[in-house]
Amino acid sequence: MEPLCPLLLVGFSLPLARALRGNETTADSNETTTTSGPPDPGASQPLLAWLLLPLLLLLLVLLLAAYFFRFRKQRKAVVSASDKKMPNGILEEQEQQRVMLLSRSPSGPKKYFPIPVEHLEEEIRIRSADDCKQFREEFNEKCHQYWPDQGCWTYGNIRVCVEDCVVLVDYTIRKFCIQPQLPDGCKAPRLVSQLHFTSWPDFGVPFTPIGMLKFLKKVKTLNPVHAGPIVVHCSAGVGRTGTFIVIDAMMAMMHAEQKVDVFEFVSRIRNQRPQMVQTDMQYTFIYQALLEYYLYGDTELDVSSLEKHLQTMHGTTTHFDKIGLEEEFRKLTNVRIMKENMRTGNLPANMKKARVIQIIPYDFNRVILSMKRGQEYTDYINASFIDGYRQKDYFIATQGPLAHTVEDFWRMIWEWKSHTIVMLTEVQEREQPQARQEEQVRVVRQFHFHGWPEIGIPAEGKGMIDLIAAVQKQQQQTGNHPITVHCSAGAGRTGTFIALSNILERVKAEGLLDVFQAVKSLRLQRPHMVQTLEQYEFCYKVVQDFIDIFSDYANFK
């Protein structure tokens, strides 16, 4: 159709031009001569010509629009012979054998998912709890699910079978077995690992780069040495995709050259694929991740190397080297307390609800209660949601209730469906192990740990290991609702228990541990978590005792 456009335009324009010229000569002759004969039939031609002119212009605009629209579509699909990039774009890294293959997310047909109002609360809870369903951000599909939830499915001539799915707090690992179904017979199946980062918010960037750095290390660990390109995609394949690739490349550059050049690398990959690293927030996040890695390095340990690491930190095999531990703990105390995010807790009406005024929740993860009718500030309690190893907001860290906050404490237990309370301090009067509201009864189990002295730390770690195991068993029976953990101020012992719960669960699942980053992550969610050097030392001691008890630790790798 496009090659005929000029011919059509010429075909229409020539008669029109002749008509207009004829009109002009007719008009001139009419001005010079006067006749009294009948009217000339050619006198109607000027009107016809001026009517055809707008129609011709409209047709011209429509044809040009159709031509350029088709041209753009064809240009996207064609790759010139001189261009060494594939249609999706291949980015060569500094090492020639490593290639990042970029792709935009697969797009399915546009769908809308109406949610009945009465089911809205339940739908939000399900979607927030099930990381496998996080494909619609703000009700817009960002990525069409290109794998089955379970079992096998055939896409074209490729059969995809789900072998495994492990959900963690920041990302999900899926294992697929793929096999082409060809007319001349099936080829050998191949195992493909998909790592799905689930902690990137709908807008902006992650609050901390810790999760992204762990995710990046896991990607590189699971990718075989002689494997083909790593496929990286987000939605459009430029913003988050570019951010991930730049962080990886700059960490490699940091190791090889002891420097980074983010601007030059981003400029280079933008020549290979447009708009890589889309926003200033993503660009800033790259620097935050690199600074985190530069300041703290890789503190992750394999369980099999823990004993050697502890011997390095010990003066002997039985006594801790306080200098090494103090240096690690000093870095933790440098984690900035974000006072600008404590506005609610610092309101005069809420300050009297705190045991220690320095230990109050951040606004972005505080536990919010239902507001009492006609009473201001009744939605506040000194409590924070804390992430677990596999699940976000798995713990509620709070202070021991004051006399005038006991009611708020039990409202929190009821409203957030907590079935488990872990108490790490002594009191004279204990709460009753059940809550009642609106004629409904729910059994709540309280685990009161008596092995923590008023000053210092427990003498041995077995009691804490047993407590964590009992709490996890209770959670499996009651549906993994938030675990409420409190001591006195809700930071020192509370933080130690939560840190050990996450550390030991990772040891059992992966055979890996990172005490430093586990505690640092807690301090970013609630100030002063794991409050003293003794408590930090106790975390290492409990892990060592755990390995000593289960000396065949290879079984839980």
Image (tube, grey):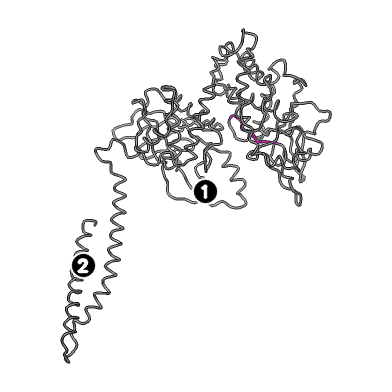
Badge 1: how crowded within 10 Å, few (<14), some, or many (20+)? few
Screen quadrant of the N terminus: bottom left
- Residue 346's x, y, as percent? 71, 40
The amino acid type found where label 2 is placed reads Ser
- Residue tagged by mark 2? 13
Screen quadrant of the C terminus: top right
- Residue tagged by mark 1? 139
- Residue 316's x, y, as percent? 62, 7
Q: Is residue 363 left or right of residue 50?
A: right
Residue at 74% across / 24% down in the picture?
A: 449
Q: State whether residue 556 appears in this view.
A: yes
Badge 2: how crowded within 10 Å, few (<14), some, or many (20+)? some
Q: Nearer the viewer, residue 205 or 477?
A: 205
- Residue 443's x, y, as percent? 74, 35
Magenta stretch bounds: 383-389
Q: Relative to 441, is 1 above or below? A: below
Using the numbered discs, state the Cα–Cα distance from disc 2 to disc 1 in whole angstroms.
Answer: 51 Å
> Between tags 2 and 1, which lies in front?
2
**The furthest residue to the bottom:** 36
Within the image, what quadrant is residue 229 found in? top left
Q: Nearer the viewer, residue 499 or 107?
A: 499
Q: Is residue 555 left or right of residue 92?
A: right
The amino acid type found where label 1 is placed reads Phe
**Disc assigned to residue 466:** none
Q: Is residue 384 magenta?
A: yes
Q: Nearer the viewer, residue 162 or 87?
A: 87
Within the image, what quadrant is residue 42 found in? bottom left
Residue at 17% across / 89% down in the picture?
A: 34
